[in-house]
Amino acid sequence: MSTVKTRELKDDAVLNIKVNKTFYLMSKAALFNSFKDLHDSKLDPQEFVKSIVSKKYEEMTDEERTFYTLTLLIGEIEKQGVETNAFIEKEMSEEALKEALTKQANDSSEG
């Protein structure tokens, strides 16, 4: 039987990762795609998210774990962005926001 080397973070490791706008937008697009793939249109989006985060990680499907992980990643990026005053705030309609996220998701999947 052959073996391969793998890496795993130490239990007490905490990393600070630098993220640029492109990576942030790609991550948001991935989260949006994951949401579109998982979300049952009969459910209110907030109820859908609550249903996932109320589950234990071990009880989630692979798709739900992906969504949850991306949500945590985006949340941390945005938390650090707010703390470092790295955001420009804009106002747009919900429809314009949906169109912008869809375009980002489509652009990132083509690239």
Image: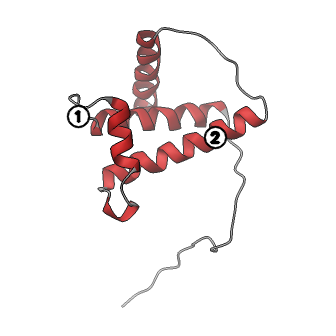
* Direction left: furthest residue: 42
Q: Nearer the viewer, mark 1 or mark 2?
A: 1
Find residue 40 and report its horizontal and vertical position in percent.
Answer: 23, 34
Location of mark 2 (residue) = 77
Q: Alpha-carbon distance for marks 1 and 2?
A: 27 Å
Q: Position of residue 101 (x, y in %)?
A: 45, 22
Q: Secondary structure at mark 2?
A: helix
- Residue 96 is tagged as none
Give the position of the N terminus as an image quadrant: bottom left
The image quadrant that residue 44 belongs to is top left
Q: Position of residue 3 (x, y in %)?
A: 44, 85
Q: Is residue 105 left or right of residue 80?
A: left
Q: Earlier in the sequence, mark 1 or mark 2?
A: 1
Please name the amino acid that badge 1 sits on.
Answer: Asp
Nearest to the observer: residue 64 or residue 29: 64
Q: Are marks 1 and 2 in contact (CB under 8 Å)?
A: no
Is 86 rendered above or below residue 13?
A: above
Farthest bottom residue in view: 1
Which residue sits at x=64%, y=30%? Answer: 21
Please identify the quarter of the rendering in which residue 30 is found. top left
* Helix, strand or loop under label 1: loop
Give the class, few, some or many, for how many residues have Cα within 10 Å of label 1's Cα (few <14, many ≥20). few
Residue at x 71% of width, y 34% of height:
81
Residue behind mark 1:
40
The way the protein has been coloured in the rendering is: secondary structure
Residue 44 against residue 4 in the figure, above or below: above
Left or right of 108, for residue 55: left
